[in-house]
Amino acid sequence: MSNNMLVALDIGTTKVCALVVEVDSNGKMNVLGVGTSKSGGVNRGVVANIERTVKSIQEAVQIAESKPGMKIKSAIVGIAGEHIESFKTNSIITISNADHEITESDIDRLIDDSRRVHLSRDREIIHIIPQEFIIDGQTVTHDPIGMAGVRVEASMHVVTGLVTAAQNIHKCVERAGLKVDELVLQPLASSYSVLTEDEKEVGVALLDIGGGTTDLAVFEDRTIRHTAVIPIAGDHITTDIRKGLGILPEQAEELKVNHGYAMVSEVVDDEPILIPGIGGRKPIEINKKLLAQIIQPRVEELLDIVAMEVKRSGYSRHLSAGIVLTGGGALLRGMPELVEYVLGVPSKIGIPQTFDGGFAREVENPMYATAVGLIQYGLKRGTGKSTIEFIESVREESSPHSDGNNGAAPEKGRGSANLLTKGMQFVKKFIKKVDNI
């Protein structure tokens, strides 16, 4: 009787983002809440300080709990970091039923068979993703369910991570008062929000440039073929600016965001930039081209590693759709042009545009690609079916916030959307109580 609700939690190096989405009976998706906070305890995608990370999660979740009475109980959580590794393995089963029809349970058997692969004690499997199937020696399409066969073989893409890294994420989320519904690889999640099926079909690489790490995912034939996490990202650019100009980290970040270019030749207006002096000293004056000369070598270093990873994947000649850029680093001016120059393939910025109502406009930004993708992943995997059990969104009659001011603009950084009338909220609350009896 109730609409499905999903919550995504993107715990990054520079920011933590919580996103609440409601899906109605017609499939329309409304953004009910968006909360972001500065990430204080994550280094290169890995939790480095439990207490600071917990505080950041709590702050983001509190902002996302925009509706009076809403209490987020759990979320789909992203995972990344240098510890992420992937490899390919094969699984084989036989079909023993009378009509030899392949069922969903047979696919599950193939995946379970892949879990028997030997791993060191400090690693665990995060995802097992089927890449292609071979039925009685014949390669088939992506979905063999319903086909007939005796011997089924599958090529699997296995993503692993450090046990302790996953445990620390679980620990932080739980200490913040939430439960982890599922851990999802961040570049895989981002692909759900910014890549089309056609792009995945002809071949495309997703490059998510965050604060601490850059995540790469290569797709072809609608299947993920290669994943990698590169320990160079936006924070390294900020550090280069800080050291190169001898300024504070906050000043370096402001320069990067407001005046930075990834490619010197893309600087059009080379106007001077005035930087306040430190400790009463005179202001420093630089131009945009000098700033770009500091930034470009670091970005080129990153892209050289990306080129090596794409070559290692074996799909460097299969990227007909080129590179799609996401993450905050994608917003650096001249980034698509430098990617095309270094990698020699088309490049564009991927902007998630999958929501219909509420504050959908707020998340139409590359920096929200992972959070939006986590929601999409949850929808396709069915993770959102039980979300009504962990989000209690009830507006009490006596609530001081129930002043009928639904049309007012929210505070900056807060998400709120299309609230139902008090009468409808009361009916939904009553129906939910009846369902739970």
Image (spheres, helix red, strand yellow):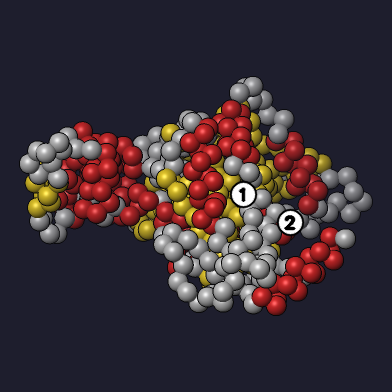
Residue at horizontal 57%, vertical 58%? 65
Specify whether 223 is left or right of 246: right
Q: Quadrant of residue 230?
A: top left
**Residue at image x 55%, y 61%?**
66
Residue flagged by tag 1: what amino acid is it? Ile
Give the residue drawn at x 60%, y 55%: 7
Q: Residues within 10 Å of mark 1 (few under 14, many from 20)?
A: many
Q: Which mark is residue 270?
A: none
In the image, which disc is placed on residue 389?
2
Q: What x and y, as percent, mark residue 291? A: 17, 45
On the image, numbered disc 1 is attached to which residue? 76
Q: What whole-number distance in Å separates the C-alpha atoms at marks 2 and 1? A: 14 Å
Q: Is residue 177 left or right of residue 427?
A: left
Q: Quadrant of the N terminus?
A: bottom right
Q: Residue furthest top?
A: 121
Question: In the rendered structure, which amino acid carries the disc numbered 2?
Answer: Glu
For the residue pair 111 and 335, the one nearer the viewer reads as: 335
Residue 167 percent across, percent down from the top left: 61, 32
Q: 302 or 143: which is nearer to us?
A: 302
